[in-house]
Image: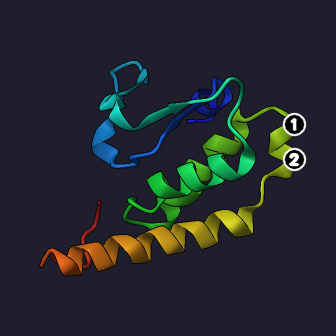
Amino acid sequence: MAMIHKMGIEQADGNLTNFLLGPDDEFAMIDEDDIRVYSGAIPVNVATQNLANVAARLAHHEMIEELLGAYLEKRHDKAGAEWNTEEFWASVYSWKQMFKKKRVQKNISPDREFD
């Protein structure tokens, strides 16, 4: 996602089914209805929320840590120095709570492994 954010693209719908990984680790996004395009790299606060939206759908803390580590490793720009990890984790928690409430409202099991 770091490259996508650098290109100015935000995928506002972080549902994991909107991302595909090919056999050679090629990354693709589908369901372009919710994509927002910026004239340059997306702002750090938007990137934080966007990555947290995706991360909150992962089942295990370790998976989120791997995603964050890979993201920050690829984000070699000025914004990387501005990244606020505490804000990221707070956003992940907030997204997880929102998804859980939505599942309860829809009478879906609130504790699913993936969202």
Pointer 2 residue: 81
- Look at the image and tell me in which quarter the N terminus lies: top right
Q: Residue at x 43, y 20 (%)?
A: 26
Q: Residue furthest left?
A: 107
What is the quadrant of residue 33 in the picture? top left
Residue 100 found in image quarter: bottom left
Residue 19 at least partly seen: no
Q: Quadrant of the C terminus?
A: bottom left
**Which numbered marker is on residue 53?**
none
Label of residue 78 in the image: 1
Up/down of 73 relative to 90, above or below: above
**Are discs 2 and 1 less than 8 Å apart at CB?**
yes
Q: Secondary structure at mark 2?
A: helix
Of the residues shown, which amino acid type is indicated by label 2? Answer: Ala
In whole angstroms, how far apart are the C-alphas of marks 2 and 1? 6 Å
Q: Residue at x 28, y 67 (%)?
A: 113
CA neighbours of label 2 inside 10 A, class few (<14), some (14 to 19), many (20+): few
| Residue 37 in picture, x, y percent from top left | 56, 28
Residue 71 in the image: x percent, y percent? 63, 42
